[in-house]
Each structure stands twice: as structure tokens, then as C-alpha cells.
Amino acid sequence: MTTHLAYADLHCHLDLFPDFASAVEEIERAKVYALTVTTTPRAWPRNRELTENKRYVRAALGLHPQLVQDHADDIHLWEMYLAETRYVGEVGIDRGPRYYRSLDKQKDIFAHVLQSCGRAGDKILTVHSVRSARIVLDLVEEHLPARAGKVILHWFTGSKSEAQRAVELGCHFSINTQMASNERGRELIRSLPCDRLLTETDSPFTQIDGRTASPLDIGKSVQLIAELLKSTPEEVAAIVFENLKRLLGTSSMGET
Ligand code: MN
């Protein structure tokens, strides 16, 4: 008997690969569900064009917090395109040393994104929260209650208590292999409820076996979770797929 595992990469950047169009086609052929995020709404028309009518690849409309310092005005463009997609990202907050000085601006932009998503309804957001879990969760709690939209915390590195708060707010977590590079990260992953687990690669920003990762490496994220939870890849892939279907509110991925 052959087992067909359904894989899903909920956070990758296909438009940063050397050949975006080929990357999309390769993932379609591999039948990996992939949510490709954008860092600027300026990339949206091309992302929409390459992903419309695709079976497995979906594009998310983003304005990356690391770009807010110099490109905050792009929020108007982001707003203009919002009605064209259910998926939003990469958005969020980065309080790392290089981006700290734009923190107030980032908060304004992220609050605006959450409010717009709440008004539009039914959006799914993939959210960056580097050194800012508390701020991100405060803003989500204030501006996007669980019934108004769904938040996936991507590459979450907050504390276990912050993760617990995120669970209470209805958030999901997309897990990549680099999150397990230290014991703190592994312990965090083990602490998450199974029904909130999703998988990601964040490719091309991650490495697998010393080379740049791609969404086709998503099996490694599944394997990692299986090891940490003392489960099997088959079981974890099935759990992630069920979580994704529930998140999307549909039994057929092709209809989203
Ligand atoms: Mn990313």
C-alpha cells in the first residue's frame, strides 16, 4: 500500500526564488499546498497572476514589518488589493535591533492591517513576531478577535506563556525546522496543542542540509514535529492537514 501524505507549507516566499513561475509549477506538480507570502503589495499583481487558477498554491498580500520604516505609504496599495485575496502576509512586528526605531510606525501599520482584515472578514493572516510576541498578541486581541479572522503565528519564538495566550486568542502556529535549533524552541513546539499545529519552510530564508530550502522540503518540518511529539510523520501530516481544513472552513482545499 502506498501512503500519500498531504503536505502544506503555510509560509514561503516563492517570489524571492530565482524563477518564481517555475517554482509555482514545481509545487503544483509535487501537490504540496503552499501559501506564498509577499513582503510588499507592489509584488501583488505578479503574485496574483501566477497563482490564480492554481490547485495548490495560494498567494498572501503583505507588507513586511522590516519594510515599514521606508515604505509605510505602501499600506494604501495593500488596502487597495485586500479585496482580491483571503490571505494576508507577511505582516506583523519586528522589534529586532535593526528595526526597533520603526516600532511605532510598525504598530500603526499592523493595527491598521488587523482592523481592515476584521472589517473585511474571513481573512487568514501569516504573522511575523520577532521579539514582539506580547505586542503582536495585544494588537490581535484589540483589533482582530477570533471570529473576525484567523492568525497563524509564523516562526513563533515567544515564551511558553505567550504561546498559551496566543492559543487562547485562537491563533495557530506554523513550524519550521530552524525553530528546533535550540532546546527552548523544541520545548515550545512540544507545549503547543496539536490542533493548532501547522507547518512551514519560510523558504528561501531557511536552510535544509546546508542548502536553501524550498517548499518541497516541507516533509522535514513534519518529521521534526513527529520526532518532538514521539509520533509518526504520517500521523503529523494528517493532523496538520485536518487543522488546515478546519482553519479554512472547508472540506475541499481546491475551493479556497
Ligand atoms: Mn517570511
Image (cartoon, grey):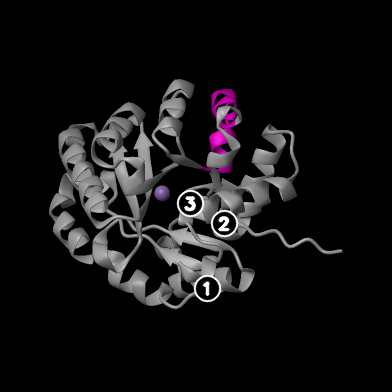
Q: Is residue 158 above or below residue 216?
A: above
Q: How crowded is mark 1: few (under 14 residues within 10 Å), some or many (20 or more)?
A: some
Q: Mark 3 points at which residue?
A: 247
- Tell me the amino acid under the disc marked 1: Arg
Q: Main secondary structure of the magenta part?
A: helix
Q: Earlier in the sequence, mark 3 or mark 2?
A: 2
Q: Where is residue 32 in the image (x, y as percent from the top left)?
A: 59, 63
Badge 2 element:
strand
Residue 74 painted magenta = no
Q: Mark 1 points at which residue?
A: 55
Region of the chain picked out in magenta, as a range: 174-189
Mark-to-mark CA distance, 3 and 2:
13 Å
Q: Where is residue 202 in the image (x, y as percent from the top left)?
A: 48, 50
Residue found 36% across the figure and 77% down from its top: 49
Q: How crowded is mark 3: few (under 14 residues within 10 Å), some or many (20 or more)?
A: some
Mark-to-mark CA distance, 1 and 3:
18 Å
Q: Compare residues 133 and 235 and report the one nearer the observer.
A: 235
Q: In this view, does 52 lie above or below 99?
A: below
Q: Is residue 228 above or below residue 81?
A: above
Residue found 42% across the figure and 73% down from its top: 51
Horizontally, residue 108 falls left or right of residue 99, namely left
Q: Where is residue 237 in the image (x, y as percent from the top left)?
A: 66, 51
- The C terminus, quarter of image: bottom left
